[in-house]
Image: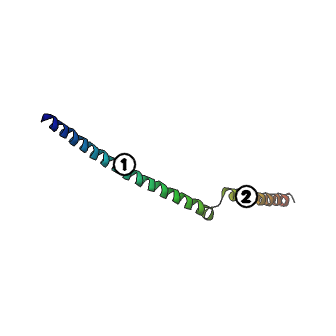
Amino acid sequence: MNDSLGILNIMDSQTLLNIAFGAVSALFGWIFRIIWEAVKEMQRDLRDLEKDLPHSYALKKDYEADVHEIKVMLGKIFDKLDAKQDK
């Protein structure tokens, strides 16, 4: 009779262990799903940002070209001023 009670106690503890493991696994799965969805949403936001950035801000290449043009114009103005000053 003691052996049968011992087996029941082992089965009960194994069942409890299985339930606990299942609950912990479900919790980790739920947390993993939330994190996975958040990462996917951030990736979508980054793609949208990459699409909108050229329309909102000047590209570095365009900015450098504009600054170069301004420097050339300022150089010409300074050359004219130097020529007038010499007269």
Badge 1 density bin: few <14, some 14–19, many ≥20, Cα 10 Å: few
Looking at the picture, tell me which residue is in the foreground, 80 or 37. 37
Q: Which mark is residue 17?
A: none
How far across and how far down the image is residue 14, in percent?
Answer: 25, 41
Numbered label attached to residue 28:
1
> Could you say which is closer to the camera, residue 27 or residue 45?
27
Q: Secondary structure at mark 2?
A: helix
* Pair 2/1: label in front: 1
Q: Residue at x 41, y 53 (%)?
A: 33
From the viewer's perspective, tell me whether residue 37 is left or right of residue 56. left
Calculate the distance from the C-alpha at mark 2 to the C-alpha at mark 1.
53 Å
Which comes sooner in the sequence, label 2 or label 1?
1
**Furthest residue in direction bottom, as rendered:** 55
Residue 83 is situated, as x and y percent measured from the top left of the image, at 85, 59
Residue closest to the eye, 47 or 71: 47
Question: Residue 26: percent from the left, percent from the top?
Answer: 34, 50
Q: Quadrant of the N terminus?
A: top left
The tag on residue 65 is 2
Q: How busy is the neighbourhood of tag 2: few (under 14 within 10 Å), some, or many (20 plus)?
A: few
Give the total of numbered labels.
2
Decide if residue 11 is on the left or right side of residue 34: left
Q: Amino acid at mark 2?
A: Ala
Which amino acid, mark 1?
A: Phe
Q: Residue at x 19, y 38 (%)?
A: 7
Q: Secondary structure at mark 1?
A: helix
Q: Is residue 79 above or below residue 2?
A: below
